[in-house]
């Protein structure tokens, strides 16, 4: 797997507005926000997309959701936020390093676009 722009952010070769970091995950602001709060939650491990994750990634994937909840609580937006994962180019994935979009502080409709 070739390095993506997110790997460069993990390696601190590229600047990003980092909100949270631990040994497994990184959270930073999306460069092209679609809401007043738009964060990206990524694993430090290189996994292209959800459908490439394996059994051994079970804890890591769970960890990413726990991080989402923690960051939302810390920011005081835990009453209303949306998590989105685009899987594959056909679903508008453009960066092939698994990431969860955390979007908040805007009106939500259902179904999503
Ligand atoms: P997706 O379409 O699901 O693959 O979302 C990729 C997101 O990554 C998109 O919303 C824009 C964001 N993004 C792309 N390049 C950069 C970057 O260099 N820095 C930051 N902070 N976000 C980026």
Image: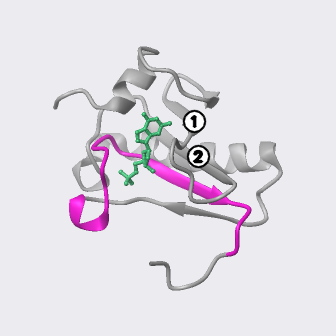
Res 67 visible: yes
**Which residue is label 1 attached to?**
28
Q: Which residue is at 50% across, 85% downward? A: 111
Q: Is residue 109 above or below residue 40?
A: below
- Outermost residue toward the right? 76
Res 45 visible: no
Query: How far apart are labels 1 and 2 at the CA level?
Result: 6 Å
Q: Position of residue 26 (x, y in %)?
A: 53, 31
- Label 1 lies in ligand 1 vicinity (Cβ under 8 Å): yes
Q: Which residues are magenta?
A: 89-107
Q: Which residue is at 73% across, 66% downward? A: 80
Relative to the observer, which residue lies in front, 8 or 45? 8
Q: Is residue 60 above or below residue 13?
A: below
Looking at the figure, which quarter contains the C terminus? bottom left
Badge 2 local density, few (<14 within 10 Å), some, or many (20+)? Answer: many
Looking at the figure, which quarter contains the N terminus? top left
Relative to the observer, which residue lies in front, 51 or 55? 51
Q: Secondary structure at mark 1?
A: strand
Q: Secondary structure at mark 2?
A: strand
Q: Is residue 48 above or below residue 51?
A: above
* Numbered mark located on residue 39 in the image: 2
Q: Which residue is at 61% across, 29% downward? A: 17
Q: Position of residue 6 (x, y in %)?
A: 38, 32
Q: Are marks 1 and 2 in contact (CB under 8 Å)?
A: yes
Q: Which residue is at 44% across, 24% downward? A: 9
Q: Position of residue 62 (x, y in %)?
A: 50, 48
- Outermost residue toward the left? 1
If you read the primary sequence from the N terminus, does the residue marked by circle 1 or circle 2 appear first?
1
Left or right of 23 on screen, residue 43: left
């Amino acid at each position: 797997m070739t390095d993506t722009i997110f790997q460069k952010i993990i390696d601190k070769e590229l600047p990003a507005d980092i909100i949270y970091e631990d040994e497994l995950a990184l959270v930073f602001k999306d460069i092209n926000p679609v809401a007043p709060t738009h964060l990206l939650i990524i694993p430090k491990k290189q996994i292209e997309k959800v459908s490439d994750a394996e059994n051994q990634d079970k804890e890591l994937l769970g960890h990413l959701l726990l991080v989402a909840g923690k960051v939302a609580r810390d920011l005081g937006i835990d009453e209303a936020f949306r998590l989105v994962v685009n899987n594959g180019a056909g679903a508008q994935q453009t960066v092939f390093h698994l990431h969860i979009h955390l979007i908040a502080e805007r009106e939500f409709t259902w179904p999503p676009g």
